[in-house]
Amino acid sequence: DGLNISIPVYFHIVLPDASAVTNSQVQSQMNVINSDFTSPNTNQLPSGATDFINDATNTEITFTLAGTFRHDDATSSWGTNDAVKQAYPPITPETHLNVWVCNIGGGILGYAQFPGGNSDTDGVVLLYSSLPGGSAAPYNEGRTLTHEIGHYLNLRHIWGDGRCRQDDFVEDTPASDGPNYGCPSYPTVNCKSADMTMNYMDYTDDACMYMFTDGQRNRMRAIFQPGGARASMLN
Ligand code: ARG
Ligand code: ZN
Ligand code: CA
């Protein structure tokens, strides 16, 4: 498609003591998303999963750290109603991915806004302890942000949020009927074929997810085409 997609990222750390999330953790988080979007760990795939090995892809979408802003705020949990975004508005969301790092509460690891929504609430909210080195094991290797950026770039959950016939609008991700958790063995079959439990858009442990597919790559990159919902991010 000829597009050079490099997304600048702003981090807003909003915690009672915002220094608790260090610059080195933010840098590690940046390293994880850059690695996940460009180098699928196909060597971790079972050798029998030849389809999955062929589908695993480099999305050629990369990220740069544009700034980190810290706000000491005594709010103990922010929920999922965008309150943290209203308190600390996104900065130039037309051109930058904004990530709010806070305590969401309710056991929620993160949530994201799909493309095409209100720019005042555009971006990703992330549980502070899901960053690399955080305390949210087994979700503390930085892959919650990988998953949430998938949503931000138009990906649905791998099971389409429905039963076997509910599509995720990606042709090379096999049907499934719900999320997988933990670190499933291969093959895990729910809808007549092996689930792609190692896809970033499932709910498995951070250590056990390691690929996007060609179809997901195409779906993400399509929104950057002229007229697409995130075309304004490229200049
Ligand atoms: N449950 C969250 C969501 O649906 C994120 C799941 C992230 N999974 C992980 N292994 N970090 O957006
Ligand atoms: Zn999700
Ligand atoms: Ca599919």
Image (cartoon, rainbow, N blue to C red):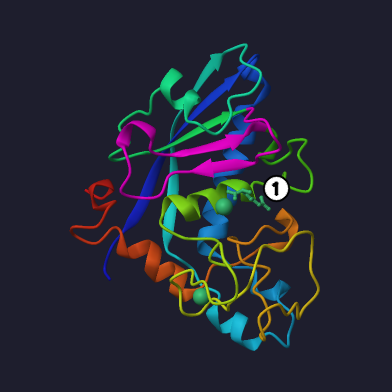
Rendered position, 196 above or below 140: below
Query: Where, by quadrant of the figure, is residue 176 drawn?
Result: bottom right
Residue 155: percent from left, percent from top: 46, 60
Residue 122 placement: quadrant: top left
SS category of the residue bearing label 1: loop
* Magenta stretch: includes residue 127: yes
Is residue 88 visible to the viewer in this orientation of the structure?
A: no
Residue corresponding to mark 1: 141
In this view, which residue lies farthest toward the left?
227
Along the horizontal axis of the image, is 64 left or right of 55? left
Q: Which range of residues does the magenta coloring cover?
A: 103-128
Q: In this view, does 51 lie above or below 36?
A: below
Q: Residue at coordinates 58% horizontally, 25% vertically from top-left?
A: 78
Q: Where is residue 48 in the image (x, y as percent from the top left)?
A: 73, 88
* Tally of numbered discs: 1
**Observer-nearest of 167 and 96:** 167
Q: Which residue is drawn at 44% across and 48% down?
A: 63
Q: CB at mark 1 closer than 8 A to ligand 1?
A: yes
**Residue 230, position in %: x, y?**
29, 51
Q: Is residue 6 left or right of residue 139?
A: left
Task: Tell me which corner region of the image, top left, top right, bottom left or bottom right, holds residue 40.
Answer: bottom right
Q: Residue at x 65, y 32 (%)?
A: 128
Specify whether residue 86 is in view: yes
**Mark 1: amino acid:** Glu
Q: Nearer the viewer, residue 125 or 169?
A: 169
